[in-house]
Image (cartoon, helix red, strand yellow):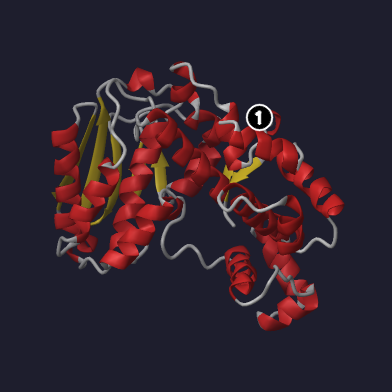
Amino acid sequence: MATIANHHAQAALRGLLQQGYDSTPLLAQAGIHPQLLKQAHLRTDEQQMTTLVQAVWDTMGDEFMGFTATPCKRGAFAFMAQAAQRCSTLREALQTGMTFYQLLTSDIHSRLLEQDKSARIQIRFARPELDPDHFLLEFWLIIWHRFASWLIDTKIPLQETQLIHRSPPHARELHIMFPGQLLFGCNINQLTFHADYLQRPIVRDQTELDQFLQQAPADLLTIPGDDNSLQRIISRQVTGSLNHLARLEFPALKTLARQLHLSPQTLHRRLKQEGTSYQQIKDNVRREIALQKMVKENRTINEVAELVGFSEARSFTRAFRQWTGMSPREYCKLVRSR
């Protein structure tokens, strides 16, 4: 399961807080404890970030999350995506999507340029001071890159990313988000990639689009083709066990290594290289399933404890407090009082 620097979760709330909203229920819904969020060295997993962004969208009714002069009504991205999915090529899809937003708002100007063998997506904000942490700018660039990659089911390598703002404290994170050459202090915000990708056909069907929109922005937080990390493979394998079992089951490390055709030592080393461990993966999966079952399905604490593999509710409560900073009862009370 991919993780995201706490900076981005903090920055995602800036527009909401500036307009007087209370972020506490939204953080609880995402399973993020406010005190833990303040610790810069900690990270938020992609499911938590997805839930947090969705909660901000729903609470504010604004897909621009309070970072522009005029809000963008919920459903705008879905409408654009529906139109883009019906296009023949990526070039046509990007032009259609950008034209839609040009007609919808004057707050963000997006355009696609081609020169020689390079394609460039350029972004300009009318009121950049409303986005002081550059959250929406960076998110907007990510959306165009990863939505384009998703449409053609191919990771589009970035040749270069240019950003107007200076190198921020989270620059290391941006080098991961925008692979390739990353430049700060430029005259324009711009993504550059090979123009050949613009000729690729759109391969996603309506069913895939419906699922994509239902989960958004989950699929925008990872680049297609980059989801074959060991931690993601293991997470999918373990989560899939719920399709035919009554509870999550985690194989022993030796058994898991054998299933993956690796030695236990190699599995441990590769997970360490990815910045995780088998125990951390198990904790992430348990937390994600537990939050989903308690919030969306209204399951009892005992039911959820058993479902995610705890022999008793007391052990589950202790683990849950480590994950979120609060007990399951405190968490549920906070979320349901929203």
Q: Is residue 29 left or right of residue 59?
A: right
| Residue 162 or residue 108, whichever sits in front | 108
Identify whether 301 is placed above or below 22: below
Q: Quadrant of the C terminus?
A: top right
Identify whether 121 is placed above or below 223: above
Dot 1 alpha-carbon crowd within 10 angstroms: few under 14, some 14 to 19, many 20 or more: some
Which residue is drawn at the image coordinates 63% and 73% (left, top)? 241
Tag 1: amino acid = Pro
Which secondary structure lies at badge 1?
helix
Q: In x, y percent, where is residue 33?
A: 67, 34
Which residue is drawn at the image coordinates 40% and 50% (left, top)? 216
Q: Is residue 68 left or right of residue 218?
A: left
Q: Quadrant of the N terminus?
A: bottom right
Q: In x, y percent, where is residue 10?
A: 55, 30
Which residue is drawn at the image coordinates 71% and 56% (left, top)? 304
| Residue 136 or residue 314, whichever sits in front | 314
Q: Can residue 60 be seen here?
A: yes
Q: In x, y percent, where is residue 88?
A: 14, 65
Q: Provide the residue designation for mark 1.
A: 34
Identify whether 66 is placed above or below 245: above
Q: Can residue 158 be seen here?
A: no
Which residue is drawn at the image coordinates 24% and 26% (left, top)? 107
Q: Count the marks: how many? A: 1
| Displayed quadrant of residue 24 | top right
| Residue 72 or residue 329, whichever sits in front | 329
Q: In x, y percent, where is residue 163?
A: 36, 34
